Amino acid sequence: MTLSAFPTRDTSQFDRGDVSFIIVAGAMVAFMIPGLAFLYSGLARRKSALSLIWAVTASNAVCIFQWYFLGYSLAFSPTATNGFIGNLANFGLINVLDDPSPGSPLIPALLYSFYQMEFACVTVGILVGGIAERGRVLPAMVLTFLWMTFVYCPLACWAWNINGWGFKWGVLDYAGGGPVEIGSGVGGLAYAWVLGRRQEKELLNYRPHNVSMVNLGTLILWFGWLGFNGGSAFGANLRAVMAIWNSMLAAAFGGIIWCLLDYRLERKYSMVGFCSGTIAGLVAATPASGFIQPWAAIIMGIFTGAICNYATKLKFFFKVDDALDLFAEHAIGGVIGLLANGLFASHNVIALDGVNTNVNGGWVESNHKQLYIQFVYVCATCTYTFVATAALAKAIDLIPGLHLRTTPEGESIGLDEVEIGEFAHDYIEVQRDYTDWTAVGKPMGDQASEVPTTDTYTHGDRQDREVHGKGRESPPLDLILEKSVDEVVSGVIEVR
C-alpha cells in the first residue's frame, strides 16, 4: 500500500500563525512552574526550601498524568450535559485531534488540550504551597491527583465547557479567575487549615531565606503570565495584545501600591512586598485582561494591590497558617478580577478576537445584571472549593501512611532533611552580623580563642555536627578571613 492510500486529515481551517502562537504561549505557561518553585523556595526557611521546589515539580508530573487520562475529558468533554462535570468520552485523549476546540474554533482540540493542561499544572503548583514547612510530600501528591479530579475539573467545566452552568449563564472568566485563582487560593487555605499551624517556635523571627530567589521567581512568573493571559485569546489577534497590555498594567500598579503600603509602616522599600503586589495584579488580570480596557486595568491593579495587602491579615482572623498567603493573593485577587468584569467588561475588547462578537459587556455598558452573575459565580466557586478540598484532605489524612503532616521533630529539623534528604543550599551559617560572633580588634591569639564552637554553627536551623564533629572547634579564623569582605559581612561562610 502506498502512502497516498492512507486517508489524510484536512487542517487547513486553522491558521498556522494562531497555532504557532498558542504552542509558544503554552510553553511560556509551562515555564511558570519553575517560577513558582523558586518563589516558594525563597519565601520559606532554608531548612524547607527544597521540599517546596520538589512539591511544585512533582505536582506538575502528577497533573500531566491525570490530565491525559481523565482531566481533559472531565473538564471539556462536549458530550456531557449535566453542567457540573464532563464525562469520559475523551478518556486518554480519545478523538482529540483536529476538530475545532471546545474553547475556540481558531485552534484544534489537540492543541487546546495541551494549553489547558498547562493551566492545570500551574494551579496545582500554587495549591501545594499550602504544605509549607510542615506538610509531607507523598500525601500532597495523592491530594493533587484527587483535587484535580474532584475540584479543578468541575470548576473548569463550569466556566469553560460549552455545557457548563457558568458558561451558559454568561459568566465572564477569561483565563481562570475561578478554576485557577480561586481554586488554588481557597484550596490552599483549606489545605493549610487541615494541616494546622506550624509550631509557635517556628513562627518566631520568620523571614524569607532568599529574597533574590523570590524576585527571580516573580519575574519568571510575570513572563509566563503573558502567555497565560495572552494565549487565552486562542489566536494571534488583537484581543491577545489587549490581554498582555492589561496584564502588564495591573502587575505594575499592583506592585507599586503594595510596596508603598509596606513603606508607610517600615520606611523600607520591600522587595518581597513589591513582588507580592506584582503577583496580585497578575492574578486579578487573569479573569479580566481579555474583557476590560487598559484604563480599567490600572484601576483594578491599584485596588488589587491595596486590598490584597490588607487581606494578608485575614489568616490571623481565620486562625489559619497560610504561610505563603495563597488566599490573600490568589483567591482575593481572583475575586477582584471577576468582579471587575461585572463592572468594566467591554464588548469592543471581547470582539477583538473576531469570534466572540455577541458577548455583552458589564456595568459600564448598562449590562447591570453581569455584576450579579459574577458575584454568584464567585460565591459558588469559593464555597465548593473550600468544602471539597477540606473533605479530600481530611479523608487522605485518615489513611494509614498518608497522614498529611510531618512530626514535630521533622518540622524542627526541616522538611528538606526528613522528606527529601537533600538541601537547596549546603553551607554553614554563623550569625547574621560578623561582629556578633568574633572579637574585632583583638590580637589573633585572642580572636582564635573566641572562635565559635560547633554549637554556634548551623546547617539551616539544625546543629551541624556532621561537618566538624561534636565538641570540636569550627574552622580557624584565618581560614574564615580568607573569604571576601562581602561574604563575611553577609554572615555566610561556605564549606570548603
Image: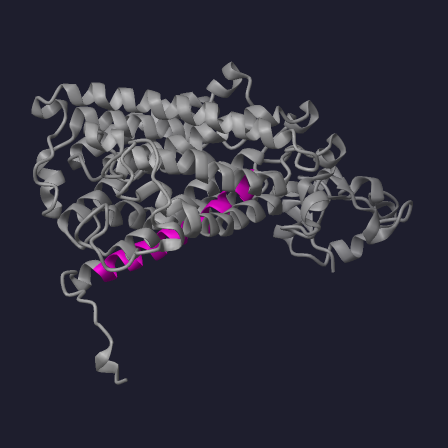
Asked if residue 40 lies in the magenta stretch, the reply is yes
Residue 335, horizontal then vertical, whole percent: 32, 26
Q: Quadrant of residue 17?
A: bottom left
Question: At which x and y percent is residue 155?
Answer: 35, 33
The residue under the point 19% across, 48% down is 104
Please state which of residues 221 and 485 is positioned toward the viewer in this rendering: 221
Find residue 136 and report its image quarter: top right
User: Which one is nearer the viewer's eye here, 120 or 265?
Assistant: 120
Q: Is residue 7 above or below residue 380?
A: below
* Left or right: 242 as drawn, with respect to 458: left
Q: Nearer the viewer, residue 455 or 186?
A: 186
Image quarter hosting the C terminus: bottom right
Q: Residue at x 47, y 27 (%)?
A: 388
Which of 164/469 is in front? 164
Q: Is residue 461 left or right of residue 266?
A: right
Which quadrant does the N terminus fall into? Answer: bottom left
Residue lying at 22% horizontally and 79% vertically, measured from the top left = 5
Residue 418 located left or right of residue 55: right
The secondary structure that most of the magenta stretch takes on is helix
Residue 368 appearing in the image: yes
Q: Residue at x 64, y 41 (%)?
A: 48
What span is in magenta?
19-43
Residue at the farthest top position: 317
